Image: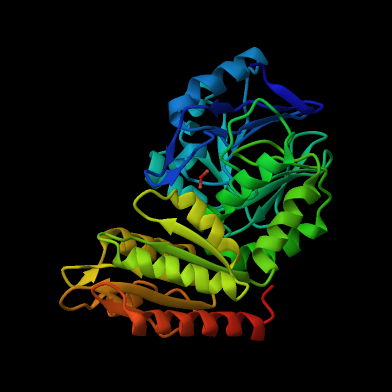
Amino acid sequence: MRPRELRPRVYSVGAIDWDRRLFDALIPLPDGTSYNSYLIEGSEKTALIDTVDPTMEDFLINHLKQLEVGNIDYVIANHAEQDHSGAIPRVLGDYPNAKVVTTPRGRDMLMDLLLVPEEKFIAVGDGETLSLGGKTLEFIHAAWVHWPETMLTHLREDKVLFPCDLFGSHLATTDAYVADEGQAYEAAKRYYAEIMMPFHTNIEKHLERIKGYQIDIIAPSHGPMYDKPSFILEAYRSWVLDPPRNIVVLPYISMHGSSQKMVEYLTGALVDRGVTVKQFNLAVADIGKLAMALVDAATMVVGTPTVIVGPHPNVAYAALLVNALRPKLQFVSVIGSYGWGSKALDQLKGMIPNLKVEVLEPVISKGFPKEADFKALDNLANTIAEKHKERGFA
Ligand code: FEO
């Protein structure tokens, strides 16, 4: 594929990774991804916005050769994570005049992560600008919108925002811009849930801040670009700011059927009371789908059998994951079973300190659930439905 020109002398020069199926050895990528990099040629200087994953650096270099780029003055490093910065050493090798432009924190991190020498950096302040000749870059510091060194870059004359990971999606496509809004929304929501949700408070501040910029195109570093910025900005506003919905997320494991029976019973009881339930059997679930469900859910009920005296390890893993993602959940409870004794409840509570939630009365059955257990599940369903109603979650 040849580089795409999105504005006069502004090109997309990154790489599409159709085959990648796991990111950070953690996150499933059902639709692959891309590592977007952008070249901006001013009348005096040339800048490259971010690079690509080092496994695909040949694609970036070939794109630069196709454009007959003889010199790069600046490599703008919006973010130090290696899927965007990993090809910086190769670019600096092929274009020895280039300096890396980043935040002071970004400089320190890139020195640590990639062993780039200090003299190769230009550290820029928040709001600082850099003229390429007829094309002006403004750097917007956005610490903890993702990582502590993160910044966004705005190309003033062409009204393009380069936000790196923010607003991205793990989606391999030959479409330069969003073409299938349904597919793009799903991919961007999955990406928000897995990667951005822990930082939703800082994202909220920056959604407000970028209202002050003229933006015709949002060009993230993963997935297609947005030539209708309102599509992704409104989606983010909804994910970040909307109250939780009348939804229970129910991740669970069952080994011999007792916990499964309780999960099925509680699901029916909640549905009877008008509550939507999203079940995730953790033996087979896509954790990306679980993360997406957590964007909107008001309540999480965890279903677990007891292994030795603790929760099933898959459930412990899910609890730690949810704790890291910091969703908008308001209520949490646990249901499950044990054979001879259990500390599963206390152990699970200890795994979710980040969640500012009310813990609802758990239902733990000794062996297969009996009449009293089903009654307790009905009570739990009543409590959840009432609390959702009281808070106005629809
Ligand atoms: Fe796409 Fe935080 O890296």
* Depth order, front residue of 84/226: 226
| Residue 349, x across and y down, in percent | 35, 77
Determine whether 80 is above or below 282 in the image. Answer: above
| Residue 384, x across and y down, in percent | 54, 80
| Residue 311, x across and y down, in percent | 27, 68
Image point (61%, 39%), residue name: 221
* Depth order, front residue of 181/134: 181
Q: How is the image coloured?
A: rainbow
Determine whether 53 is above or below 198 in the image. Answer: above
Identify the image quadrant of residue 169.
top right
The N terminus lies in quadrant: top right
Identify the image quadrant of residue 160.
top right
Left or right of 250: which side holds 345?
left
* Depth order, front residue of 48/16: 16
The residue furthest front is 371
Identify the image quadrant of residue 130.
top right
Tell me, yes or no, if residue 328 can be seen here: no
Left or right of 339: which side holds 113?
right
Tell me, yes or no, if residue 385 can be seen here: yes
Image point (70%, 40%), residue name: 219
The C terminus lies in quadrant: bottom right
Left or right of 17: which side holds 36?
right
Total numbered labels:
0
Image point (77%, 49%), residue name: 231
Left or right of 230: which side holds 108?
left
| Residue 45, x across and y down, in percent | 71, 30
